[in-house]
Image (cartoon, helix red, strand yellow):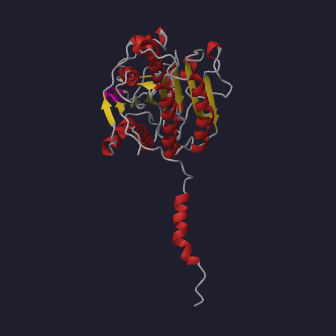
Amino acid sequence: MVKQRDVTVFYDERVMAHHPDSEVQFLPGRLDKRVRSMLSGLNVQWKYPEHPGRITAIMDLLAREPIPGVQFQPGKAATRDQLGRVHTTSFLDDIFSLRNESAWLDVDTTAVSPGSVEAAEVAAGTAIAAVEAVVEGRTGSAFAVIRPPGHHAEPVRARGFCLFNNVAIAASHAQNALGCKRVLIIDWDAHHGNGTQDIFWADPDIIFFDMHRAAPFYPGTGALTDVGAGRGEGTTINVPMPGGAGDEAYLKAMREILVPAADYFKPDLVLVSAGFDAHWFDLALNVSYEGFSSMTGIVQGIADKHCGGRLAMILEGGYNTESLSRGVHTVLEVLAGAEPKKPRVCGIAEVEAAADFHRDAFAPDNPD
Ligand SMILES: [Zn+2]
C-alpha cells in the first residue's frame, strides 16, 4: 500500500480568455497576409488548435473522476519583473501593446485575442504559484493547468502558441526569490523546448533535459550535440527521437540519461514541462497512458531522492482533448501516491483474450 501524497492543481479561469479566432480580421500587415495565404493553402478548415476546450476537458475529467489527495488552488498573474527575468524589455513592451487586440505574432500561426495578454500573465503567474507552494512545503507536489503553453517562447519572440515561457519564469523565480540553487527542468512534450533551451543555454545552475521528436518536426531544434555553452556547457541534454517512438524509448532515455544526470547535478527543485502530445492520439509519437504513469514515477523518484519530493509540473501541449485530459489524470494519480502502471505492448492482452475465444472452434473434432 503506497502512502497518499498531497498534490495541488493550480488553475485560474482567466487563462480561458486567450482565444484567437482565425476567422476574424487581425491587425493589418505583412504577417496577416502571409498567415492568411498559408491557411488558404490548406485543404482543411484550420481552427486554432490551442483552445480553451483543452483546459475544460482536463478540469471536467478531474471533477467526474476525483483523485483522493488532489486539491485545487487558484492561480495569479505574474508581475512584469517576474516576466523580465527571462524576456527582454522590448519584447514585453511589444506584447503588452497588444492588450485587448487581435494579432498574428508568428507565421507558425501563433496569435492573440483581446484576453490573451492577461491569460499569458496568469499562466506564468500560476506556474510561479505552483513552484512557491512546493518550495514552501504547502503541498507535496503541484500541477499548473495553464495555457497558453510556454516552452517555445524565446527571450525575444513568441512562437509555437507560446507567449511567455512559463516554466523558465517559474525556474528563475525559484532561483531568485525562493532560494533554490539548482533546478532540473524535464521537458517531455513531443516538441523540443527551444525557448527554454535558449534561455538557460549558458546557465550552469539549470539542467534542461528534453526528449522530443527530432527535426524536421517542429520547431526543428534540439540536436543531440546541443549541450549548452560557456559555464552552461553540459547542462542542456537533448534526446531527439524518430516519429513513432514510444514508451520503451522514453523510459530508456529517462533511466539511462536523466537519472544519472540528476544524480550528478543533485537538483533542489524538479520542474516538468508536461505536454501530452507524445501520446499516440496526437500522431507524432507513441507514448501510452501507462507510459506517462511510469515516467511520472521516475520523475517522482528523482525529486524524492534529491530534494524532498519538491516537484511541480507545468502544462505544455497536447491537442487531442481525450488523451490530454486522461494523460493529466494519469499523472496526477501517481503524484497522489498510486503505484505507477507498467507499459504493455498495445493489443497483446486483447489478442490473448481473442485466442482463448477462438481456440475451441478450430480444435480437431473429438474422435469419440
Ligand atoms: Zn508540443
Residue lying furthest top: 89
Q: Does residue 228 sit above or below 249 in this rendering?
A: above
Residue 265 at least partly seen = yes
- Tell how many labels: 0
Depth check: 58 or 303 in front?
303
> Dividing the image into 4 quarters, which one contains the C terminus?
bottom right
| Image quadrant assignment for residue 97 | top left
Q: Does residue 132 sit above or below 22 in this rendering?
A: above
Q: Does residue 360 sit above or below 70 in this rendering?
A: below
Residue at 44% x, 36% y is 47
Look at the image and give the residue range highlighted in magenta.
11-16
Q: Is residue 12 magenta?
A: yes
**How would you classify the magenta stretch by its main secondary structure?**
helix
Q: Is residue 206 magenta?
A: no
Q: Position of residue 259 (x, y in %)?
A: 58, 32
Residue at 55% x, 68% y is 355
The reply, left or right, for residue 114 in relation to residue 297 is: left
Q: Position of residue 183 (x, y in %)?
A: 51, 21
Residue 97 at least partly seen = no
Q: Position of residue 274 (x, y in %)?
A: 48, 33
Residue at 60% x, 24% y is 264
The reply, left or right, for residue 136 in relation to residue 244 is: left
Q: Position of residue 307 (x, y in %)?
A: 48, 25
